[in-house]
Image (cartoon, rainbow, N blue to C red):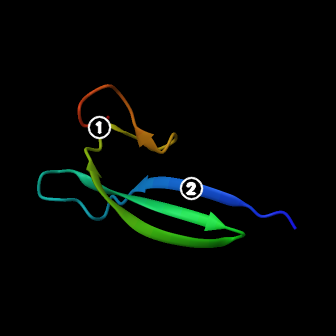
């Protein structure tokens, strides 16, 4: 039996912090069963690339 596995990083835009950053959440899916959790990391919206699911650029915040 073949199993499937995927990981998706996304920003929760409805949970904006006081400093303007957003929390990064992770969704792990194994054989169609998904689990979401907070990565405990924050990112500014101008740095986040939603299509790629990661922070873009070479700034200290992006790395």
In space, the residues marked 2 and 1 are separated at their CA atoms by 22 Å
Across and down, in percent, residue 10 comes to 44, 54
- For this orientation, the residue located farthest to the front is 1
The N terminus: image quadrant = bottom right
Across and down, in percent, residue 25 comes to 40, 60
Across and down, in percent, residue 15 comes to 27, 64
Whichever of labels 2 and 1 marks the residue nearer the N terminus, that label is: 2
The C terminus: image quadrant = top left
* Left or right: where 58 falls relative to 2: left
Could you say whether the residue bearing mark 2 is in a helix, strand or loop? Answer: strand
- For this orientation, the residue located farthest to the left is 18
Q: Is residue 28 above or below residue 22?
A: below
* Left or right: where 62 falls relative to 31: left
On residue 7, which mark appears?
2
Instruction: Tell me which residue sits at (51%, 39%) in the image.
Output: 52
Across and down, in percent, residue 39 comes to 36, 60
Count residues near mark 1 (Cα–Cα under 10 Å), then give few for <14, some for 14-19, many for 20+.
few
**Residue matched to label 1:** 46
Could you say whether the residue bearing mark 1 is in a helix, strand or loop? Answer: loop
Q: Quadrant of residue 32?
A: bottom right
Q: Is residue 57 above or below residue 2?
A: above
Q: Quadrant of residue 2?
A: bottom right
Looking at the image, how many numbered discs can be counted on the residues?
2
Q: Quadrant of residue 60?
A: top left
Depth check, mark 2 against mark 1: the one in front is 2
* Left or right: where 24 falls relative to 59: right
């Amino acid at each position: 039996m073949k199993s499937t596995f995927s990981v998706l990083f996304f920003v929760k835009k409805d949970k904006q912090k006081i400093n303007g950053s957003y929390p990064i959440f992770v969704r792990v899916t194994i054989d169609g069963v998904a689990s979401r959790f907070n990565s405990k990391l924050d990112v500014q919206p101008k740095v986040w690339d939603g299509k790629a699911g990661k922070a873009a650029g070479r700034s200290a915040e992006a790395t």
